[in-house]
Amino acid sequence: MTDRVVNFSPGPAVLPLEVLTQARDDLLALPGIGISPLEISHRSSWFDGVLAETEANLRRLLSLPDNYRVLFMQGGARLQFSLIPLNLLRGRTQPADYLVTGTWSQMAVPEARKEGQVRVVYDGQGAQFSRLPRPDEYFVGSDAAYAYYTSNETIQGVQFLSEPVAGDVPLICDASSDFLCRPLPMEKYALVYACAQKNLGPAGVTIVILRDDLLGRCADGLHTVLSYKQCAKEKSLLNTPPVFAVYIVLLVTRWLLDRVGGLAAMEALNRQKANLLYTLIDQSQGFYQGHAEPGSRSLMNVTFRLPDEATQTAFLAGARERGLAELKGHRSVGGIRASIYNAMPLEGVWALADYLREFQVYSRR
Amino acid sequence: MTDRVVNFSPGPAVLPLEVLTQARDDLLALPGIGISPLEISHRSSWFDGVLAETEANLRRLLSLPDNYRVLFMQGGARLQFSLIPLNLLRGRTQPADYLVTGTWSQMAVPEARKEGQVRVVYDGQGAQFSRLPRPDEYFVGSDAAYAYYTSNETIQGVQFLSEPVAGDVPLICDASSDFLCRPLPMEKYALVYACAQKNLGPAGVTIVILRDDLLGRCADGLHTVLSYKQCAKEKSLLNTPPVFAVYIVLLVTRWLLDRVGGLAAMEALNRQKANLLYTLIDQSQGFYQGHAEPGSRSLMNVTFRLPDEATQTAFLAGARERGLAELKGHRSVGGIRASIYNAMPLEGVWALADYLREFQVYSRR
């Protein structure tokens, strides 16, 4: 086995070693079946079982009420930017209200505008998306078709740890980069979606959880593969799902249930990991400058800068030498980003914390 | 290692053992990188290399002219049913001409009708899709925006082994279930697409090859993720591609080049495998009744029936006992279907041929 580095990639991102080991062991042939999960039919009883158990595990992890459907789709968050307005805004006179708190919620707006009226009820760009709005800084109209927000902005590292106020308006959440990082009060949501490649599995599958009544609101005449109603009707088997990716999601949900012990335990661990890094940043006397304001900080993506570009370059080079990989910030904003999703072990964060301490001491000499 | 069965699944389908072994060896960590291909960033230099080599291998295998683009997309053939008319029929007064030779081409028609006028210039349903049209049985109008056909109908087992006549009209082909089974005269095509899960890799990635000038014809104002122009502009990195699935496609193209020796050699092997089964069917004195007429037979999916349902059930049970799996025909048509894609080894077909002979003798006793 080749040594593994500590992978701080923002996505695709680190997976639990137990998941990878199981996938490797099954890769040539599933025991008792004799077919690789890369080759097996989506109509096989094995895959029926994978779909059913993955859904059951998600229901258990989230205490999901019965009146919600779980869909497995392709196309990533980007396709959902379009499917949400295609299904829920097209042909309506009502506007949709969007909270823009970072790059990803900002990117969802122009797609929605293709299907109807959009009100940007909060725009954090003026503050470089360094903080979330206070409740008095935005207002979701009761006439809105839906209210849309992004629970965790991967690039800027700001995260909602409770739901924005939307009254009775259907609340829609892009939870791509923090889904399953903590228990979610699912009854507050009309629709939550998450691409897999942060907390759930490999790139190529997206989980969409939506309340039954939303299906009745979906636009008619859509292309079959773009319709939530059709995907729900066919129970995610409208066409061939990404079988292997769904199977990895199954293994991740098993890991969350059996190894981690559920989402409350996951949240406690995530808080411990994030606090370790934020405390170091706060105690660095300005050597490490966090991007997000303390009340808006993400448990998943810790973003910060060093005093200058040369120091940052040296920091990244030294990190790579220690096997601390993928710490460079997004090309659009620069700086450093440590993505510490569910599967990042505490030991990985310890190693980064040690390096942060030592690098500061070394740089100040 | 668990014993592998001979997997005649129509898709997801058998992959070369060399490909699976390589994927297994890399699964915990890529050598020298220390990150699993399930976890690695799509912005990594490793994945840049994967995309570049996969495209180069496809170009080499197909002798692809320089004025064609290669896109890696998600959503399977079903999404292409919609993207083709969304991009190339929407807003036009010209009709699109569709050849309907089986279930899959038939399913593409209603999606196209959502965007414009469709002429079904051939409909083989009357003959249970048991044969392809003769050139005098259809006519593609010179006014058509494009002509669309499905090169291999997986469910019925009929395959075009040369292109239909479309004059100067842009020819579009769903090659999902026979792509790379033989050399293709790519300069005859405007667009060819194939989902991976038959001849290319696992479910979850779709290859779209299109001629440059088509990008200029694409409709404006489409949702970004649904636009060929945008996907081409971003070189398949508009959003996170299904990294692991693309990596398996890379391994399959390497296998085709290095082990098989290219598409001419692949075609020779495919013809040998198919001939073995069709010859047995033809010599069975009607015990095995082929569905496709001899001139239309597929090299990929060999479809046939046995004298009655009880015999068919016994046939399938006996096959499973010998490790010959997934031979049941599609639920919409019944019968037997042996899918013998590129990666089905000759030995697998020999095993099935032996069983066909013995089962007939046994049944006649």
Image (cartoon, coloured by chain):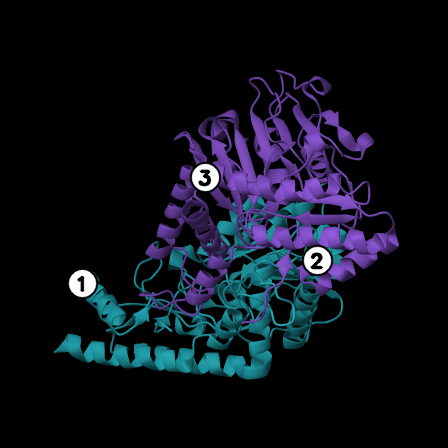
Chain colours: A cyan, B purple
Under mark 1, the amino acid is Ala
Q: Nearer the viewer, residue A30 or A288?
A: A30
Q: Which mark is on residue B38?
A: none
Where is residue A102, by image quadrant? bottom left
Q: Are marks 3 and 2 in contact (CB under 8 Å)?
A: no
Q: Position of residue B195 (x, y in %)?
A: 57, 46
Question: For numbered disc 3, what is the local secondary structure?
Answer: strand
Q: Residues within 10 Å of mark 2 (few under 14, many from 20)?
A: few
Would residue B220 be seen by someone viewing this image from the given angle?
no
Question: For numbered disc 2, what is the local secondary structure?
Answer: loop
In the picture of the structure, the residue carrying the numbered disc 3 is B70
Would residue A25 be seen by someone viewing this image from the given angle?
yes
In the displayed structure, B21 sits above or below B335; it is: below
On screen, residue B65 versus residue A261, left or right, reads left
Q: Position of residue A194 (x, y in %)?
A: 56, 62
Tag 2 and tag 1 share a subunit: yes
On screen, residue A10 versus residue B288, left or right, reads left
The alpha-carbon separation of the residues under discs 2 and 1 comes to 55 Å
In the picture of the structure, the residue carrying the numbered disc 2 is A43
Q: Nearer the viewer, residue A312 or A85?
A: A312
The alpha-carbon separation of the residues under discs 3 and 1 comes to 39 Å
At 59% from the left and 28% from the top, the residue drawn is B162
Q: Are marks 2 and 1 in contact (CB under 8 Å)?
A: no
Where is residue B160, by image quadrant? top right
The chain containing the residue under callout 1 comes to A
Under mark 3, the amino acid is Val
Question: For numbered disc 1, what is the local secondary structure?
Answer: helix
In the picture of the structure, the residue carrying the numbered disc 1 is A310
Q: Nearer the viewer, residue A146 or B97?
A: B97
The alpha-carbon separation of the residues under discs 3 and 2 comes to 30 Å
Q: Residues within 10 Å of mark 3 (few under 14, many from 20)?
A: many
Tag 3 and tag 1 share a subunit: no
